Image (tube, rainbow, N blue to C red):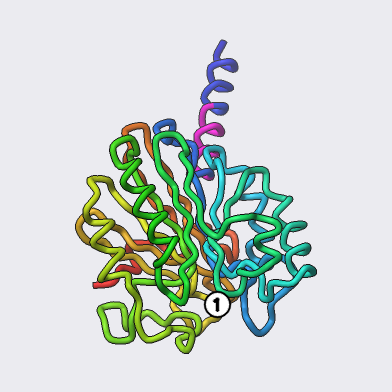
Amino acid sequence: MKYLFYGLILFAFLLVRCDSDNPSTDIDVRYSFFAAGHVYGNPITYDYGVHSQLDSNFFFLNNYSTLDFGVFTGDVVPKPTNVYWDSLQIDLAKLDMPYYIAPGNHDRGEEFRKRYSNYYQSFYHDLDLFITLSPTNWNIDGEQLNFLEKVLLENTDTANNIFIFCHELIWWSPDNQFQDIDINWEPHYPGSSNYWDVVDPLLRSVPNNVVVFAGDIGCNSGKTPCMYYRYENIELIASGMGSGDKDNLIITEVHADGSYDFNLIHLNGDDKSGMGMIYDYSVK
């Protein structure tokens, strides 16, 4: 009997140890999703298909037990041509889950519309509302603004959390509180954005928690790898890849009570928590 007893203890120890290696084994997690930006990687040494460090982490993502889907926050291809889109889709077929794309300036064009139809959309997952956007020259305006207003108006009473995805850090300006965030290509900034005048009041008017993800940072070692900022009911998060040493994505775990946590996943090396927590990159 004592051998059986010691065997059960060893089994329990191994089980706990295995679980500790997988952050998604919390029984309170209802589902998870990832957000990943600048998927083609470094603008000088990019590959066909996804950035190599993301590709090497597909096994990790596919085995993250609560992960239901992913959202790519723009610049998934370096050029919107048939050959780059084919290469991307071959790589993304390795993912064992659905994915969505919030297209960036490198992605928009005939090939995107042929393969994915709309530049912006909304959908529910569990009790939460998801919205992908594609700013026009850093602005949410025209038909896209009408779409956002309509989706929020019709769903704030039924949605728990609202998660929004786009490519550009539309809240950024070289002369506001985010000026120290080194975005991927500052000349791409048109000089103004309607985020604070138009989009922000719209998001603050809803009773829900709102998280906005962007992906236009981290393309090389000189750029900011990620950022976090919270005010009122809104959280702003940006992540990116291409640096070769601080490539990252965000996994959001949604709990049974509707709360959520963000896991900053370091894509370089074996330590997925090697960059710390997203809150370590908070803008003051």
**Left or right: where 43 falls relative to 216:** right
Q: Nearer the viewer, residue 10 or 76?
A: 76
Hey, which residue is sitting farthest top in the picture? 1
Count residues near mark 1 (Cα–Cα under 10 Å), then give few for <14, some for 14-19, many for 20+.
many
Q: Is residue 16 magenta?
A: yes
**Left or right: where 81 falls relative to 251:** right
Q: Please tell me whether residue 194 is drawn above or below residue 28 in the rendered image.
A: below
**Left or right: where 79 falls relative to 140:** right
Q: Nearer the viewer, residue 14 or 166?
A: 166
Q: Residue at x 23, y 56 (%)?
A: 204
**On the rendered image, what quadrant is the C terminus found in?**
bottom left
Q: Please tell me whether residue 149 is drawn above or below residue 87 in the rendered image.
A: above
Span of residues in magenta: 12-21
| Count of numbered tags | 1
Label 1 residue SS: loop
Q: Nearer the viewer, residue 89 or 227?
A: 89
Q: Residue at x 55, y 28 (%)?
A: 10
Q: Please tell me whether residue 192 is drawn above or below residue 268 in the rendered image.
A: below
**Three-letter code, disc 1:** Cys
Q: Nearer the viewer, residue 106 or 180?
A: 106
Q: Is residue 17 magenta?
A: yes
Q: Residue at x 26, y 81 (%)?
A: 176
Q: Position of residue 73 (x, y in %)?
A: 52, 62
- Residue tagged 1: 219
Q: Position of residue 103 (x, y in %)?
A: 56, 64
**On the rendered image, what quadrant is the N terminus found in?**
top right
Identify the main secondary structure in magenta: helix
**Left or right: where 2 falls relative to 148:** right
Hey, which residue is sitting farthest bottom in the picture? 187
Q: Position of residue 159 (x, y in %)?
A: 34, 38
Q: Position of residue 156 (x, y in %)?
A: 30, 42
